[in-house]
Image: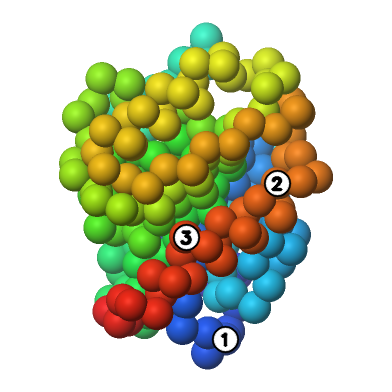
Amino acid sequence: MPHLQGFRYRTTSTTDTRPPLLLLHGSSRDETELLPLAETAAPGWRYLSLRGPIPWESGYAFFRRNPDRTLDQADLVLQTERLHTFIQAAIETGLIARPPILLSFSNGAIIAASLMIRDPDIAAGAILIRPLSPDPDAIVPHMPTKPILILSGDRDSRRSPEDAVAITRQFQAAGADVTSHSSPTDHNLHDDEPAIIKQWLTSRVFPLAHTRPPL
């Protein structure tokens, strides 16, 4: 499996000019977890699916948690910087042609949010599935009209109802174009969510792809 800057990945080869999708899986999973979602919600789109660099339980994660499952903030900052460096290298080497859309789940969604807070310009937008704010008190850099989709589950035992509200407000305060949707489900993906993502990509991201030239 190819690797770059310490990350192993899978990718598709296509001449599609839309922003590529960067797939960031949940904890204890790997680079294959979000492939069915990407193929269903974004058929024909270029994707780059990463394996988290941290061995975790039966799979991998993008950052560590403390024994009480709170976020290991020091490691999250370190791993966010590593992911930022990877995306820069992916663009510089031509692995991807432009900043990606972050398609992320759980552990991956938290580091995706952390990445957007660190540098909004590193991504063209983000799909955050079951996210948690990496830093509820952080002042998020201005990101006018940056498209962000936040998907929560109203029966999710790993998240409180306030988690999705808090991260939505955090990005809205920075000027982002935030769409938030709650599904009748737990932490797992709901059957309707691929269609929600597909519609969001069509209405919020694809029009922008026509107005922003490739980098």
Q: Amino acid at mark 1?
A: Thr
The quarter of the picture where the N terminus appears is: bottom right
Q: Position of residue 104 (x, y in %)?
A: 54, 47
The quarter of the picture where the C terminus appears is: bottom left
Residue 193 marker: 2
Residue, x 59% and y 47% (percent of image)?
A: 25
Give the mark, 1 or 3, whose residue is nearer the N terminus. Answer: 1
Foreground mark, 2 or 3? 3
Residue, x 68% and y 22% (percent of image)?
A: 154
Foreground mark, 2 or 1? 2
Q: Is residue 213 above or below residue 174?
A: below
Q: Residues within 10 Å of mark 1 (few under 14, many from 20)?
A: few
Residue, x 31% and y 76% (percent of image)?
A: 212
Q: Amino acid at mark 2?
A: Glu
Q: Quadrant of residue 31?
A: bottom right
Q: How is the image coloured?
A: rainbow
Q: Position of residue 163 (x, y in %)?
A: 49, 21
Q: Amino acid at mark 3?
A: Arg
Q: Is residue 133 left or right of residue 200?
A: left
Q: Position of residue 118 (x, y in %)?
A: 24, 43
Disc 3 target residue = 204
Disc 1 target residue = 14
